[in-house]
Image: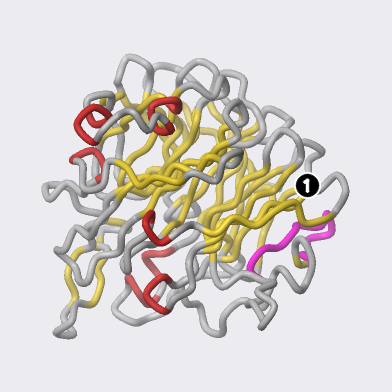
Amino acid sequence: MTTDDTRTDNGIEVEAEAYARFDDRAGNPAMTPDGRLLVSNHPFPYGDPPEYRVVEYVDDGTVRPFPNEAWSTPPGDDGVGIRSLIGLRAAPDGTVRILDIGDPAEGHPPKLVSWDTTTDCLKRVDHIPGHATTDRSFMQDFAYDAVRNAIYIADLGLSDEPGDPGAPALVALDLDTGRTRRVIEAHPSVMPDDSVSAVIENEPVVQENADGEFEPISAGLDGITIDPSFEWVYYCGITTESIYRIRAADLLDESLDRDGLDARIERYGDAAVCDGITVDTAGNVYVTDITNNAIGVTRPSGEYEIIARDDRRFLWPDGFCCGPDGHIYFTVTQLHRAPPFNRGEEESYHPFELFRLESLAPVTVGR
């Protein structure tokens, strides 16, 4: 393991430690209460597709399919398996939830697979109903609410081409009742900011449009998390510079119409162009700051600061998880070097890395 010590202007010192390495591009991490490290393999191309959709990291540096080979590979006729995913969470009770992005346009709805790691068996599968999706849905991350037994999904709402903001929205699923609602679709808080661009390693991140030309990416809702008391859901877009929050109870309250729910949204503070967030007990929202090759924090005061930076190795820090050891873990995906965002060229280096750092205040497993 190697470390990188970074001191911020206000004197806070954070040690970022390389914890694990992977042959495939790890998307989001999750860590169970007993310390098992899992990662989703990113669906964006890197040569041949990864053999497994979710893997468990083994101490000797190898990986194995999680929860098993059948569920970690594409679905067969029996529906067992995962098409593609990014979103992965481990709950305080040891349940690991896997959010299959699916392919709504082709008739394959997203689904949430819940696996009990204490008994090593399938707990349940929840399909996201059609009224909560669109043909542009891309349900790439979520937060689990252990108090209300609910999940809150960030639907990026894919754009047809660069410049099109898509149709981002939050999807709230009550796991007790099965009731699902699509909320705050196209609200300003989930939309990209046209004045903000993603520039990494001095180059704009681009995407090919329908005419075969490359234009800077513009993407809204992406990062989502819930606080340790399960009161507030925090979220942000990629090409934005703000963190927002809303009460978890409000997302499930069907008596609130669109205007009533939109009025409950709060801007929490400044941020940076990012791809993932998490939050500690003191209200510090951690941000994977992709343009500064850094990890930043949005304070309860609304101010943003960088707490760890590595211009060589933090190339597109991506997903977070919180471990039982009090550390925050994050993947580095180098997506700006992957073909979809790099003019068709693959220039990522191996291996892909996962780092950890000590949190500024206590954190809990499951976010």
In the rendered image, which residue does mark 1 sit on? 36
Q: Does the magenta run of residues contain 54?
A: yes
Q: Is residue 260 left or right of residue 362?
A: left
Q: Is residue 87 left or right of residue 325?
A: left
Which residue is at 32% across, 42% downward?
183
**x, y percent for residue 345:** 37, 81
- Residue 293: tell me if it is visible: no
Report the span colored magenta.
Answer: 53-64
* Position above or below: 126 against 256: below
**x, y percent for residue 101:** 49, 64
Which residue is at 41% across, 70% downward?
104
- Looking at the picture, tell me which residue is in the foreground, 6 or 212: 212
* Position above or below: 169 against 206: above
Q: Residues within 10 Å of mark 1 (few under 14, many from 20)?
A: some
Looking at numbered disc 1 in the image, what kind of residue is underneath it?
Arg
- Looking at the picture, tell me which residue is in the foreground, 201 or 344: 344
Q: How many marks?
A: 1
